Each structure stands twice: as structure tokens, then as C-alpha cells.
């Protein structure tokens, strides 16, 4: 089901607005992540999609249908929360069958459907156990199967992996992707973990302070961040940020004067600082001093001083000595300028905002 928000705002108490004029469309059959820091309004957005919470203003559409006034039951969404909320006294199979029982589906039919779902999420060998006897990952699978039981129009997942350890999180996020692709159900996945969002989604909606920052593919978010917030939020190690005033003429030859005049912040991805000239891909050279150099496995990280400011690079070919002078070559891809509102005004693909 395609989901559209038209100018949706929300206030819980009528005074403080939590979400401001959200406009977006989640295409049918896709997996979209809502990504942003704690408290930015991710769960609130999901609750409005589910129908558990009504917008203060604006409209919500499922396909062409205005569902703004429709309640949660009528919207037929499946939800999975962080704490799974399985019924402890029911077996795995009974848990998956429960929504079908409520919907008065006949017993043989609901058993057949529940078994299919148990297979889909790979818990078919656990069906007679109680949730207490399952691992976190298995409980999560059961919760997803239960949410899918009524063939929901949408599957909504609110930080469903946050109770799992690091390895299981990675395994389960791949499982969620597989299940989504096998069922084709439009899925909205809330997370504050950029890595999770980048790996699982077709599109990512980045939220901050109740404002949508950008809604695009992982690749576009990384290569063409629309603003400084997105540039800093996406990417590991984090992008280097400097003030335009930290540069002393190094950019004058390379950036049009009118853009340089508006620029306030400079963002340079760690991989966009190289110790060798790469011809046309190099935009400018800067003189730095090496402060730290670490080499382990495939990684070579250097901390550098540039006019008294710190820079981090991951693209060093040679071994470096502390306090050594080093010329760094700024690469075009991964170099951005932002104006006083944080908007990207240089770098990336200028057609993509
Ligand atoms: N029931 C409520 N009543 C009043 N304010 C609320 C309520 N629920 C959430 N808020 C406020 O709305 C804002 C957004 O909350 P929300 O739960 O949507 O954030 P979130 O992005 O899901 O955060 P987290 O990552 O911590 O789960 C926060 O400032 C929060 O304090
Ligand atoms: Mg939340």
C-alpha cells in the first residue's frame, strides 16, 4: 500500500508542535526506514501511519484513499514494537494464530496460515514452545509472523532490533529484508541506527526535530546530502566539518566566488582526503601536519592538523610519522559547502537535493 502524508503536523498537548508539515510518499511494495536521533518524532510518525494517533493538521492517504479519520483496525496494519509483546502463556503457533482467531478465521485455516508464516520466518521447529523458551531473535521472528498473519496492508516496525546483540541485529535485519521481499508487503522500519537503515532500506527518511531532512536512497543520502545535518548523521567515520573561515585562500581558485561568499561550513568525508594527487578528481591541495597515524587491518587512519583544526582521513597510502608535514589532496566527491541555514550549495550532484 502506498502511504502519503500531506502537510501533516502533530502536537500532543496543543501547544508544542512535535512534527512539522510532513510531506512524503512511501511507494507501494518498498521498505522505507525512518531514521533520526532519539526524540525526533519517529515513533510519533509511525503511530500516525498506524491510526493509533490522529494528526493535528494535514491528511494521510493509503493509495488514493483519505484515511486520516480511519481508526487503526480499519487501516489493517501489522505492527511490531521493540519489546515484541508476545503472549507468554501461548505457544509460538498460538501467538501467530491469535490475530486470526480474533478475526474469527476457522481453526484449520488459521493453523495452516500460521504454519506457513512460521516457515517464512524460520521458526517452524519452535512452534510448540512458549516465548519464554525462545532466544531474542526467535521471539522477534514470531512477532513479525504474528504481525503478518492478517495479511496487513502495511508492516510497521518500531526499533524492532534494539533488544538484540550486535551479531543478531545484523542477522535479523537481513531476515527482515528477506521477509519483506518474499511477501512484498510495504514496510516502514523505524531506527536511530544509520547502519541498519542503510543496509535494509529502499529509501530512507531522515528526521530531525520533527522536520523531514531528506527522503532518498542510501546512496543519495551519502553522496548528495541535502544539508549539513544529513551529511553529519550519515557516514562512519563521521564527515570532517570546518568553518569556511578555517580556509585561507585554498579554495579561491576552485570554487566560484559567489558560492564561496555564501558558504559557512565545509564538509569533507574522511575518504575525500588523500595523500596523492588524483588529477581531475582532485579539487584542491592543502598543507597539514600529522598528529596521529594508526594502521590496523585494512584501515589506516590519520589525524591531521590544518590551520589549528583537526581533520581525519582514511585514505593514506604511505606510512606517516608524527609531526610530519603532509600535503592532502581534496577529492571532488565527498567535498561539500553549506550555507548559513546548513543547505548544501556546492559538491555532490547539483541536480539532486
Ligand atoms: N504521549 C506523548 N505525550 C507528549 N509528548 C510525547 C508523547 N510521546 C512522545 N512525545 C514527545 O514527542 C517527541 C517525539 O517523540 P517520539 O517518541 O516520536 O520520538 P522518537 O524519534 O521515536 O524517539 P526514540 O528514538 O527515543 O524512540 C519527543 O519530544 C517526546 O517527548
Ligand atoms: Mg521511538
Image: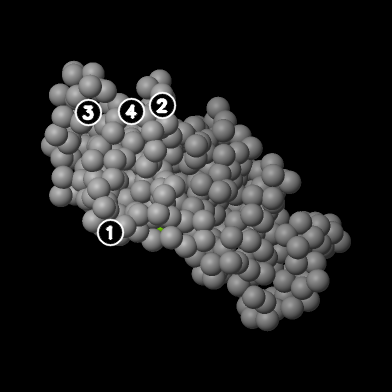
Please report contact status of discs 2 and 3: CB closer than 8 Å, yes or no.
no
Residue drawn where x is 19% and y is 49% of the image: 309
| Residue neighbourhood size for the residue with mark 1, other residues' Cα within 10 Å, grouped as few (<14), some (14–19), many (≥20) | few
Could you tell me which secondary element the residue under label 4 belongs to?
strand
Say which of marks 1 and 4 sits in front: 1
Q: Please name the residue shown 23% across and 18% down the image.
A: 256
Q: Earlier in the sequence, mark 1 or mark 4?
A: 4
Q: CA distance from mark 2 to mark 3?
A: 16 Å
Counting residues from the N terminus, which is met first, the one under dot 2 or under dot 1? 2
Would you name the residue on which mark 2 appears? 279
- Quickly name the residue at label 4: 283
Q: Nearer the viewer, residue 96 or 325?
A: 325
The disc, 3 or 1, on the residue closer to the chain's N-terminal end is 3
Q: CA distance from mark 2 to mark 1?
A: 27 Å
Q: Quadrant of residue 280?
A: top left
How many numbered circles does the render carry? 4
Disc 1: which residue: 322
| Dot 1: element | loop
Please name which of the two marks, 3 or 1, marks the residue nearer to the observer: 1
How far apart marks 2 and 4 lie (CA) works out to: 9 Å
Q: Which residue is mark 3?
A: 251
Front residue (pair 25, 284): 284
Q: Is mark 2 within 8 Å of ligand 1?
A: no
Q: Is mark 3 within 8 Å of ligand 1?
A: no
Q: Earlier in the sequence, mark 2 or mark 3?
A: 3
Instruction: Between label 2 and label 3, give the one nearer the viewer.
Output: 2
Residue 349 falls left or right of residue 312: right
* Residue at (84, 59) in percent of width and height: 112
Marks 4,3: beta carbons within 8 A: no
Amino acid at each position: 500500500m502506498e502511504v502519503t502524508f500531506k502537510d501533516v503536523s502533530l502536537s500532543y498537548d496543543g501547544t508544542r508542535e512535535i512534527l512539522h508539515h510532513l510531506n512524503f510518499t512511501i511507494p507501494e511494495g518498498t521498505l522505507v526506514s525512518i531514521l533520526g536521533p532519539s526524540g525526533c518524532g519517529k515513533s510519533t510518525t509511525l503511530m500516525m501511519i498506524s491510526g493509533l494517533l490522529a494528526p493535528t493538521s494535514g491528511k494521510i492517504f493509503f493509495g488514493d484513499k483519505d484515511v486520516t479519520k480511519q481508526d487503526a483496525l480499519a487501516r489493517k496494519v501489522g505492527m511490531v514494537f521493540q519489546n515484541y509483546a508476545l503472549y507468554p502463556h501461548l505457544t509460538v503457533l498460538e501467538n501467530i494464530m491469535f490475530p486470526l482467531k480474533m478475526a474469527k478465521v476457522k481453526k484449520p485455516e488459521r493453523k495452516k496460515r500460521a504454519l506457513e508464516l512460521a516457515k517464512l520466518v524460520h521458526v517452524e521447529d519452535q512452534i510448540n514452545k512458549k516465548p519464554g523458551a525462545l532466544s531474542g531473535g526467535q521471539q522477534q521472528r514470531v512477532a513479525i509472523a504474528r504481525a503478518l498473519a492478517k495479511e496487513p496492508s502495511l508492516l510497521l516496525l518500531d526499533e524492532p532490533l534494539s533488544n538484540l546483540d550486535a551479531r543478531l541485529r545484523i542477522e535479523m535485519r537481513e531476515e527482515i529484508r528477506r521477509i519483506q521481499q518474499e511477501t512484498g508487503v510495504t514496510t516502514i522500519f523505524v531506527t536511530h541506527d544509520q547502519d541498519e537503515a542503510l543496509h535494509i532500506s529502499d529509501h530512507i527518511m531522515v528526521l530531525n526535530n520533527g522536520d523531514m531532512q531528506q527522503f532518498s536512497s542510501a546512496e543519495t543520502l551519502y553522496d548528495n546530502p541535502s544539508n549539513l545535518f544529513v551529511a553529519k548523521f550519515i557516514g562512519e567515520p563521521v564527515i570532517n566539518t570546518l568553518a569556511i573561515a578555517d580556509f585561507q585562500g585554498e579554495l579561491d581558485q576552485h570554487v566560484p566566488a559567489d558560492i564561496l561568499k555564501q558558504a559557512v561550513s565545509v564538509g569533507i568525508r574522511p575518504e575525500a582526503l588523500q595523500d596523492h594527487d588524483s588529477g581531475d578528481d582532485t579539487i584542491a591541495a592543502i598543507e597539514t601536519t600529522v598528529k596521529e597515524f594508526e594502521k590496523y587491518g585494512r584501515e589506516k587512519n590519520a589525524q591531521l592538523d590544518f590551520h589549528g583544526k583537526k581533520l581525519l582521513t582514511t585514505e593514506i597510502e604511505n606510512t606517516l610519522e608524527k609531526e610530519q608535514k603532509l600535503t592532502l589532496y581534496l577529492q571532488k566527491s565527498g567535498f561539500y559547502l553549506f550555507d548559513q541555514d546548513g543547505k548544501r550549495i556546492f559538491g555532490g550532484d547539483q541536480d539532486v537535493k
